[in-house]
Amino acid sequence: SPMMEVTERFLIDNLDEESMKEFAPKLEGVLRSAVGLPSKVGCSRVLVLLSMRNVLFQPYADRFIQLLRKLVLDRNDTVSASYCTSLGYLSRLGSDSQVMKTIEYAINLYTSSEDAPHRAVAAEVLHSMSKLSNDRFMVFATTALPFVFVSKNDVDEHVRDVFEGTWQENVGGSRAVSLYINEIVATVTNNLDSPRWSIKHTA
């Protein structure tokens, strides 16, 4: 839109360290208070653009990763998908602890939910991180990929497909299972006792 073009060309392109100190808290406030789909998706787009300015935005990446983990479960699927994409881009700049916490968040969201939409968001978070920040994602492959392997057997077709895509994009053939066999078995064992039928069925 013309408004987004103005935001990109005349606001983001002219940010420096000093103006960023004032801009970041205001962007955070808008993210927290945004109501409509255009506002939320617009904020997400701004975060993606900022994530491409490594030196300028890196000091602020962790706080926005934390915030997006709270916002990603939006009632609107388009907004959720947009926030997942932002998380993927921001993971390039995030600290190891925040990247790990985001992976753990996705795993916990999946295993604690009977609702397919929540499991789909978990799948999208990991897929976005894998696709858009692959080098950072692969640092934590022993945590993420065994879970992805198990979850690509989900009872819901969409959830299954997203996890399947993440697995295929990150492994080099069926022999990769042997690399993570202990972690896969541990994940299955833990989930066999789940009180949630969908999780137990997947295990």
Image (cartoon, helix red, strand yellow):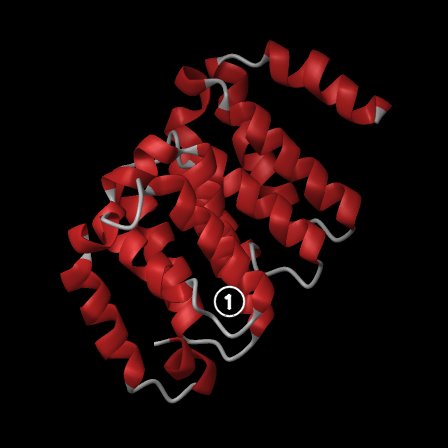
Horizontal and vertical percent position of residue 144? 30, 53
Report whether residue 64 is seen. Answer: no
Q: In the displayed orientation, state which residue is furthest to the front.
A: 174
In which quarter of the view is residue 133 placed?
A: top left
Q: Residue at x 65, y 33 (%)?
A: 45
Identify which residue, 115 or 158, lies in the foreground. 158
- Residue 132 in picture, x, y percent from top left: 46, 33
Residue 97 location in percent, x, y? 26, 45
* Observer able to see residue 96: yes
Question: Image check: 81 left or right of 146?
Answer: right
* Depth check, front residue: 203 or 134: 203
Quickly name the residue at label 1: 119
Q: Quadrant of the N terminus?
A: top right
**Does 14 appear above or below 33?**
above
Q: Residue at x 57, y 32 (%)?
A: 47
Task: Left or right? Give the position of 177 relative to 157.
Answer: left
What amino acid type is highlighted by mark number 1? Arg
**Residue that appears at 37% across and 34% down:** 134
Q: Nearer the viewer, residue 118 or 165?
A: 165
Image coordinates for residue 125, horizontal then vertical, percent: 48, 51
